[in-house]
Structures are given as structure tokens and as C-alpha cells.
Amino acid sequence: MPDVNPEFVKYAELHIPGRDPIKLPILKGTMGPEVIDIRALGKEGYFTFDPGFVSTASCSSRITFIDGAKGILLYRGYPIDQLATKANYLKTCYLLFKGELPTPAQYEEFEYKVKHHTLIHEQINSLFQAFRRDSHPMALMCGIAGALSAFYHDNLDIYDPEHRENTMIRLIAKMPTLAAMAYKYSIGQPFMYPRNDLDFAANFLHMMFATPAEDYKVNPVIAKAMDRIFILHADHEQNASTSSVRLAGSSGANPYACIAAGIASLWGPAHGGANEACLRMLEQIGTCDRIPEFVARAKDKNDPFRLSGFGHRVYKTYDPRAVVMRETCHEVLNELHIKDHPILDVATELEKIALSDEYFIERHLYPNVDFYSGIILNAIGIPTSMFTVIFAIARTIGWISHWNEMQEMPESRIGRPRQIYVGKTLRDIKASPARRRSAKSSAATKI
């Protein structure tokens, strides 16, 4: 792989009283802000303090670029809206992992490989029986994703590019199968085997909703919507779950363990569970006439209520994924003949307020992708407990692409964040009165 080190542009000087200035290189990538290289500070006896690493670049990467101020999201240089409308999920997977969109011949070969790795080892079926039927599907995904290394240990040499690519294919092929199995197990229905005659999204929907008792035909509009959801969630730079995968991978852990770490991080409500929280909020509001009440509560600093689905840690303008999701949401509801949908009515009115109310504009609280994806998944019939699981299916290619890139970078090293210690200073253990009396007694006995 070509060198991915950013370009050196100049030096910054750090002035500390009583010391000579410390020169720190300033680096520049192909896009985005300049970055101060602070690696030399450790040798000088200093560390930086950055809770949440919000001002720290942990790596250099060629995969995804975000400009939050301008609302830009690029996969390998391609705008997310173009990929969502002109490509499909498997083409996007190929792009993220290999760096370029596939030619027709490359895509045909890649699709064939993915479709012929969707089956899982039959012994994995028994693993589901170890979980309670009412377990959260993400609990199953965490456990079983990590267990895959026990079944597919023939390609675990992380330094072998062919092994890494084979693992990537296995993961993106098998995650929808595992996700559908987690859902079927939770409702007591038999597992449905994947079908190689269906495309990626349609196959997942078939495994979710088909039963052996009758034929099930996948609605192409719904399949297209699901494919877009997968594309829009495929990667998002160095977020919490991707950083978890990279950190686990930095130790040399096998890729299945690293993906399990990503799933665990994604499970958090502040990350992958945001669309579920948004839907619950819309249901709580219920009708448009109650919106002013909840908007007032959101503006009240003394009220713990917060509007979910607005604003983003990175984006300071409209989330570019939300634009595509909004259009897709209307397509799905029209296809399903849902004309009077109170949740969508509430969402539409909230969107109008967010785009016109000074309170929202000043704080950059624009609707994000979670605002609409939850409505779509709910309309399709997917329970809220599965929302984050679907996110995990989509993000698997982003996780494994970053993991793969990390293996190819010569500057990669095991992650080891530092800290500011604020605990007790050096102290000694003092003997308790009982121990002192015991010591005197023993001394007297010896005398």
C-alpha cells in the first residue's frame, strides 16, 4: 500500500516557562484541517489532556472524510448521496475495503464470493440456545461474532493480505445471517437459510420475515431502502466503535474479536442506539399538538428531557445522510400506503421547527440520519431492539476496512492512552491497633 503519512508543512512552537521552545511538526492531509504532531512531547515529559479524544487524530487514513461544518461525508472521495443513489451496498463495501469502485467483472466476482459465504457453520446454531430467549439481540451479536474465530480459524494470519480479505468477505456475508437468526430466536421462529438468488438487502429481509410455512416475496422498494440504510451507515471515520476496533486490533487480536469489540461499543445509546431513542421520543410526543410542550422542555436547562435525532457530534449543519434518508422515508411510507402516519407527521413538524427556530439554528441542532432511519425501520416492521443490530451489519465493512488499513500502516502501534493522575500521593500502610497489640503480645511471649 502507498505511504499514507500526511504532508509536513511547518512547525509549531510550544513555549513552557523555564524551558527552550519545543518544536512540533504541523501536518496536512489531502483534505481537512492541519494537525499538530505531538508525539515528541512524551520524550519531553509532557502529555496532552483531551477527554474523549475530540481534538486528537489517532491515525492517518484514506477511507472516509467528514467536514462537519460543511455537511460533507465522503467514502474514498465519493459523496455519500451519490453512493446511496447510484451504487449499492456491496459496491460500497468493495470501495471501502479496496479503495476504488469495482469494474463489472470485479463486482461479479466479489458478489459471488459474498453470496457463497452467507451460510454459517451448523454448530453455531447451538450457540443461540445458550442465551435466554428474551436476550437483547445485541447481546447475541457480541457473543457470536467473537465466537466466529473458533469456527473460521484458517484465515487468521493478520499479516497475510489474502487472509484479511477472506475474513472481510466472511464477515460482511455472515453478519446479516447472524442478525436474522438473533431476531428469529427472540420470537421463537425457525431460522431461515440465506438465498443466493437474492441481492444483499433482499436476502436479509427474506431471512428476517420469511417462514417455512409459506412463500415470502421481498418488496423491491423496501429492499432498496434497506440497501440505502446499509450504505449510509457503512462508515463514519473514527467514531467510538471504529476506534474500539482499531484499539483492539492494535494489540494483534484476531479480526472477529475486534469486530465484537466494535459491536459492544456500538450498543451504547449515545452511538448505535440513537435511532431507537429517536423513535421512542417521537412516540412519546405522539401528536403534533404536543410538539410545543416538548420543544419548550428541550429549551429548559432545568429539564432533563432532550430531543433525540437532532444535532451531531461532528456535523454543524444538516447531516448529509439525513437528506437521503428523508426522501427514502417518504418512498417507503408511500409504498406501504401509510398516508396518515402520526409519527412521520410529528417528525416533519419537528424538522420544520429545527430549520427555522433560532434556538436550533444557533446550536446547530439539525435533523440527523437517526431522525428518519428509525421511522423507516419501524414502518418495515423491524422491532426497535433490532435497530442497532442493523447498524452493526452496515458498519461491519467500515470496521474491517479500518482494521485492514491499520495492519498495512508502518507507523501503527499498540494503543496506549495516557492520563492525568489525580489520586492519592505516595503513602505507607499503617498497622491497625489490633495488629500492634498482637505484635507486642508476640514480643512479650518470646521474652
Image (cartoon, rainbow, N blue to C red):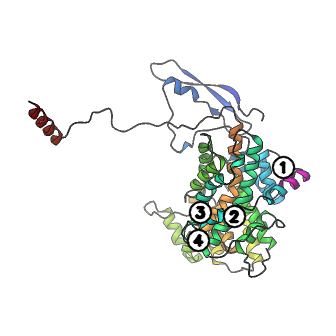
Sooner in the amino-acid sequence: mark 2 or mark 1: 1
Within 10 Å of disc 4 (Cα), the crowding (few <14, some 14-19, many 20+) is many
- Residue 417 visible (yes or no): yes
Residue at the location (61% across, 55% down)?
A: 263
Residue at the location (51% across, 72% down)?
A: 293
- Region of the chain picked out in magenta, as a range: 104-110
| Element class at badge 3 | helix
Residue at the location (64% across, 34% down)?
A: 35
Relative side of 305 to 278, left or right: left
Find disc 4 in the rendering and name its residue: 282
Relative side of 161 to 306, left or right: right
Sooner in the amino-acid sequence: mark 2 or mark 4: 2
**Rendered position, 43 above or below 141:** above
Q: Are marks 2 and 3 in contact (CB under 8 Å)?
A: no
Q: Are marks 2 and 1 in contact (CB under 8 Å)?
A: no
Sooner in the amino-acid sequence: mark 4 or mark 1: 1
Query: What's the residue type where badge 4 is placed?
Result: Leu
Find disc 3 in the rendering and name its residue: 140
Q: Please tell me how many numbered marks the rendered image carries.
A: 4
User: Whole-percent x and y of residue 32?
Assistant: 69, 40
Report the magenta stretch's main SS.
helix
- Judging depth in this view, the residue of 114 and 106 nearest the camera is 114
Q: Quadrant of the C terminus?
A: top left
Where residue 25 is drawn, which disc sits there?
none
Within 10 Å of disc 1 (Cα), the crowding (few <14, some 14-19, many 20+) is some
Q: Are marks 1 and 3 in contact (CB under 8 Å)?
A: no
Relative side of 101 to 283, left or right: right
